[in-house]
Each structure stands twice: as C-alpha cells, then as structure tokens.
Image: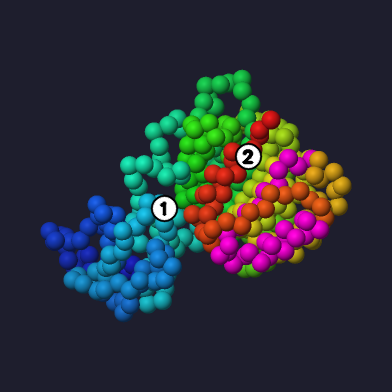
C-alpha cells in the first residue's frame, strides 16, 4: 500500500498549490444520492470500485491522473468499499472513514435521510461506549474490549443491568460492532422506542490465538473461551453494575463470533441464559458443543437459543446441519432463515431482532 501512495505524493509535490478546479475529496455524495468516487494514481493501468455493487465497477482515468466513477442513486445505509488498483485492493486515501479490521482494506460510506434507519443516529437519549485495556489471566497479555452502557446508566446509581456479550467476525476487531455495525445506536433507538430493556453490550476482541491460521479456528475458540470466562466476565461484573447471573447474561455473535457464542453459551448455560448465533461458522459442531448437548437440563436452563442466517449465505448448508444436530438432541431453538447473504446489512438487522427478546419476565 505504501508503494501505491508514493506516486500520488510525488504528483502532489510537483503540482504545488492545488488548482481551483481540483476535484473534491472522495467520496462526493450528490443531492440525488448518486456518489462520485475518485482515486489519483498516474501509474495505474486499471482501477475498479469494489463493494457498492455485487460486481466491480470500472473507473475511468481523467485529468491529473484522477480515476473516477459515479454510481447510484444509492439507498440510505452504511457501505464498505475499496479500490482495486491493478488487482491490488486498497482503501480510499481521501476518505478518513475506514472500517475497523485486523488488516484494514475497506473504506466506509454512509448515506443518510431525513428519516434515519434503525442503526443510524436519531435525536434520542444516547448511551456511552467505554474503551478498555485489560490483562488476560489465561493469555498472559494485554487485550482490548468495548463496553456500551445505556442511557441513564450514570444517573441511576442504584440500578443493575443485564449484559449482552456481542462477538465480531473473522476479519474484524473489537471496534467493528460499534464503528461499522452501529450496535450502540441500534440499542439507543430500541430503548428509546421501548422495544428493548436497557442493557450493557460487551464487545471483546475475538482473536485470542496470535498464531491463528486461516480456516483453523479451534485453538482460537479454546483460548477465547478461557479469556471470556476467566477475564472478561469478571472484569465486567466487577467494574459495572451488572446482574451477575445467567438470567442477566446473553451471548451472540456473527460468523466466527457466532460459533464462539454458540459454543460458549451451549456449553455454559450456568453462565448465559440467552444464546444466539448470526450466520454462524459451525465446523465440527458436535465436537465444539458436545458437552452442552449431553446436558439433560439444557432446555430448562436456557431461556432462548436463537439462530439466524441468510438464504444466500455461503455458510447456510453448515448452519442447517447444526440446526439438525440440535433437533436430533432435542434442544429447543428459534431457527430462522432470512433474506440476505453474509453481510452487515443482515447482521445489524439480527441485532435489532435479537435484543428485544432478551431479559423479559
């Protein structure tokens, strides 16, 4: 990526003062919700826009080696996109909004309207997102997590709150659920509408194994479970006014995080009474949740086991096999196949649907 930025910097230095007709920064959102994307590189042979549409869009080279394309109108929402420059994926260097990822390579675009979507900012009371560093007793190193406290938390000193532990996917970090998924705004809006009870959200870093290999998540699952149960839950219960019982805890996640939430939750119903999985990655499911499936009182201990996946998701076949495994063992579950694929538009909707089911009498 540094090699690609070098010629751009050279052009800027040669040009000196920017000319009056220099194109505005990318992306430029027009009044009709069309969007102009621009990328400057005099050495590139091809530049394509990736991420707004399901197929890549060719960009055309113009004056001052600026490649550009106009797409849309684009529906309101939050999108990730990148530029494919001679086959190399890059962020938009003119856009400071970058999706939080382990290896960031996508930029973020938000299209708003006068009527905000369920995950966009509204003029309601808002909670607070707290950033934490903590020492993991099992991993013997510093880790990071985020904690959302709902509106009124600081004013109601005598009140205790339930907690939803919310996990991210393979390429993400502990920041992705708030910065890109807008989990805190989803909860703000649900609470304001009376659709969800006020609760904490805890979003840890799902990558506990520093040597984790692509496609091999078992070691990471084991280390992550030890970290969550041994460090994260005790940290939250000691530092926040929680309801420190299974009835006061829920657990859910997407993709890799969905397997983590299902594995930890089903194997530890004494810790979590509400369990979910969003588009869960479920390899070797019987090995991972075998202990929980042998628990004859699992249905009595778990108030809700909720699993959803999109009908166009590449993980659907594995998820259906997991669903059938639970049926085979007589495990009660709420199973739903929805519209959509393996994407954030689906997962934001799942959080909106899951949170109102939690911590009800």
Residue 193 appearing in the image: yes
131 left or right, relative to 321: left
Q: Residue furthest left?
A: 20
Residue at 54% across / 58% down in the picture?
Answer: 339
For the residue pair 249 and 40, the one nearer the viewer reads as: 249
Where residue 10 sits, quadrant-wise, is bottom left
Residue at 47% across / 40% down in the picture?
Answer: 185
In the picture, the disc for residue 357 is 2
Report the magenta residues as a range: 301-328
188 left or right, relative to 320: left
Which residue corresponds to mark 1? 78
For the residue pair 295 and 317, the one nearer the viewer reads as: 317
Secondary structure, mark 1, is strand
Q: Is residue 192 magenta?
A: no
The answer to whether 345 is drawn above or below residue 82 in the figure is above
Secondary structure, mark 2, is helix
The answer to whether 203 is drawn above or below residue 287 in the figure is above
Q: Is residue 312 magenta?
A: yes
């Amino acid at each position: 990526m540094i090699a690609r930025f070098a010629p751009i910097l050279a052009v800027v230095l040669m040009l000196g003062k920017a000319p009056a007709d220099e194109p505005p920064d990318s992306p430029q959102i027009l009044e009709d919700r069309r969007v102009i994307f621009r990328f400057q590189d005099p050495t590139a042979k091809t530049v394509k826009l990736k991420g707004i549409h399901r197929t890549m869009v060719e960009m055309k080279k113009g004056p001052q080696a600026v490649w550009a394309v106009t797409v849309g109108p684009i529906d309101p929402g939050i999108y990730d996109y990148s530029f494919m420059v001679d086959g190399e994926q890059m962020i938009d260097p003119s856009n400071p909004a970058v999706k939080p990822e382990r290896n960031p390579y996508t930029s973020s675009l938000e299209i708003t309207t006068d009527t905000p979507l369920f995950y966009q900012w509204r003029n309601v009371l808002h909670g607070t997102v707290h950033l934490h560093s903590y020492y993991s007793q099992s991993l013997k190193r510093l880790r990071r997590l985020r904690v959302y406290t709902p509106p009124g938390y600081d004013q109601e000193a005598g009140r205790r709150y339930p907690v939803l532990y919310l996990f991210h996917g393979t390429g993400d970090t502990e920041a992705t659920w708030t910065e890109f998924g807008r989990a805190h705004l989803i909860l703000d809006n649900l609470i304001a509408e009376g659709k969800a009870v006020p609760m904490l959200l805890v979003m840890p870093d799902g990558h506990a194994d520093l040597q984790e290999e692509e496609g091999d998540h078992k070691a990471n699952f084991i280390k992550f479970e030890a970290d969550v149960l041994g460090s994260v839950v005790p940290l939250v219960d000691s530092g926040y006014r929680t309801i420190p019982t299974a009835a006061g805890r829920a657990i859910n996640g997407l993709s890799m995080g969905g397997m983590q939430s299902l594995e930890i939750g089903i194997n530890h119903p004494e810790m979590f009474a509400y369990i979910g999985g969003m588009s869960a990655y479920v390899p070797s499911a019987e090995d991972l949740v075998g202990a929980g499936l042998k628990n004859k009182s699992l249905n009595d201990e778990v108030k809700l086991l909720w699993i959803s996946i999109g009908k166009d998701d590449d993980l659907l076949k594995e998820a259906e096999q997991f669903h059938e495994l639970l049926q085979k063992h007589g495990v009660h579950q709420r199973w739903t196949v929805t519209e959509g694929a393996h994407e954030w538009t689906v997962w934001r909707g799942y959080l909106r649907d899951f949170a109102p089911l939690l911590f009800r009498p």
